[in-house]
Amino acid sequence: MKLSNLLIASSTCLFLFACSATGPKFSPAQVKKPNDSLLYVYRSDAFCLGGRAPDIHVNSKKVGVLSNNGYLYLDISPGPHLIEAKGLFDLPSTALTLNTEPNKSYYIKWIPECGFFTWKLKLVEIPEKIALKDIVNSQAVE
């Protein structure tokens, strides 16, 4: 292999690795305030839009940037909350409203679907049993 090809391949691998979350592996968190709930927002490890990380907003407040194979979590009070993923240049924002109850955990997955010329982005509430299997290899966004 030519040196130039080796350098290009190495640079590409480093770029893709740098786009992934780098924090500790998933570990369930504890709620800090009585009667609050936990909200997890995560995304799987996928090449589709892997180099692009959406800003996650809860009730119009930015709470983090969701890297590939990453998750973030926060305490939220009971009631309705607007969860948004936005900030991906030319790609549309996506949102959902979540009505939370005290002392529960909620899991929202950001799912990019890539076609040849199109992208579809969505936030989906995932049942806890499925989410815990799905998020187990994710890393915390720091």
Image (cartoon, helix red, strand yellow):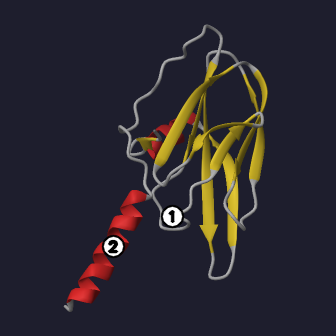
Q: Does 87 sit above or below residue 135?
A: below
Q: Residue furthest bottom?
A: 2
Rendered image: mark on residue 51: 1
Q: Does 56 sit above or below residue 75?
A: below
Of discs 2 and 1, which sits in the foreground? 2
Type of amino acid at the residue the image marks with label 1? Gly
Q: Quadrant of residue 13?
A: bottom left
Q: Residue at x 38, y 46 (%)?
A: 22
Q: On the picture, is 4 further left or further right than 133?
A: left
- Residue at mark 2 to residue at mark 1: CA–CA distance: 14 Å
Percent across and percent down for residue 56 are 65, 43
Q: Which of 2/80 is in front?
A: 2
Q: Residue at x 37, y 73 (%)?
A: 12
Percent across and percent down for residue 59 are 77, 33
Helix, strand or loop at label 2? It is helix
Q: On the picture, is 73 further left or further right than 23?
A: right
Q: Which residue is mark 2?
A: 11
- Mark 2 vs 1: CB contact within 8 A: no
Q: Residue furthest top?
A: 34
Question: Which quarter of the rendering shows the C terminus?
Answer: top left
Q: Residues within 10 Å of mark 1 (few under 14, many from 20)?
A: some
